[in-house]
Amino acid sequence: MAYPGEWLEGYGLAPEPGFEEPSNGELLPIGCPESLVSLELAECLIHASRNLPYRSDRPVDIPRGKSIVRLRKALLDPFCVEHYRGWMKVAEACESPVEAVAFLSLCASLATAEFPLAVTTPGVIPELPELADRMTLAQVVLQEPADDYRIDIALHFNCRLGKHIYSCDLAIECDGLEFHSSPIQRARDETKSQFLANAGFSVFRISGAEIWNAAAKHDQRMITTLRRFCGQLIHGMLPEPVESRIKATNKQRHDRMDSAHRM
């Protein structure tokens, strides 16, 4: 038997100082659905920790915050149960546990909000989906290439109206303290954010502490952005169709390459 929250023991995960996990006051039998989700989530985060860009002989301590408690319960939602193992398999390619938690939390939030959802494997630029008129699809992409950059988590919300697809594009950047606190790295982050904004993305930068303890709050900000975009489409406030934007972006890239070649 195990109390809620004790699933972390033996997996190198450390309780966050001063944080007490909410308990339903009941024992969880080993093998019950919640304990199985907890085990799989812990293994996913440990796997993601092996992808950190530094090498260390000591075990990586992953704090147990409110987002972890919320996430393991959210993954038991009927909208998530069918897909969460696939999400976890993709999340193993994340470059850090922080990125994995942000990715899994976003998928769970979109699913429970009943958004049609597709997850694209890391490092792939997603193709436009085949959609019928007035159908929508949210595409979540890990480490999407963007010119010379790579987006931690990209979210493309596509909606077809008539013969055109319109898209709301979000870039989620997970800023762990260890890699994003130096002046040089902050300057690089600012340059990257400006590039993504110019490319048509709404940029969300979320600190590691916020991901561990308030991922759901930031997911709600993104869902509000998507619903606002739907409202704009309903009221005829149509942006440039995504097909035209792709053509314009490709032309700019080719122009830059031609200029570099002439130099």
Image (cartoon, rainbow, N blue to C red):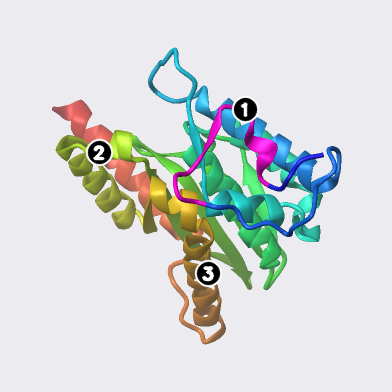
Q: Counting other residues with Cα less than 10 Å from the Cα at mark 2, is it few (<14), some (14-19), or many (20 or more)?
A: few
| Quarter assignment of residue 29 | top right
**Where is mark 2, residue-wise?**
256
In the structure shown, which secondary structural element does the residue marked by tag 3 occupy? Answer: helix
User: Mark 3 or mark 1, which is nearer the start of the sequence?
Assistant: 1
Q: Within the magenta stretch, is there residue 18?
A: yes
Using residue 111 as the reference point, say whether residue 200 is left or right of it.
left
Magenta region includes residue 252: no
Residue type beneath disc 2: Arg
| Residue 211 left/right relative to 261 | right
User: Where residue 257 sits: x, y (%)?
Assistant: 27, 33
- Dot 1 lies on which element? loop
Name the quarter where the N terminus is drawn. top right
The residue where tag 1 is placed is 11
Q: Which residue is mark 3?
A: 226
- In the rendered image, which quarter is residue 146 located in? top left
- Over which residues does the magenta segment extend? 5-19
Is there CB contact under 8 Å for labels 1 and 2? Answer: no
CA gap, disc 1 and disc 3: 36 Å
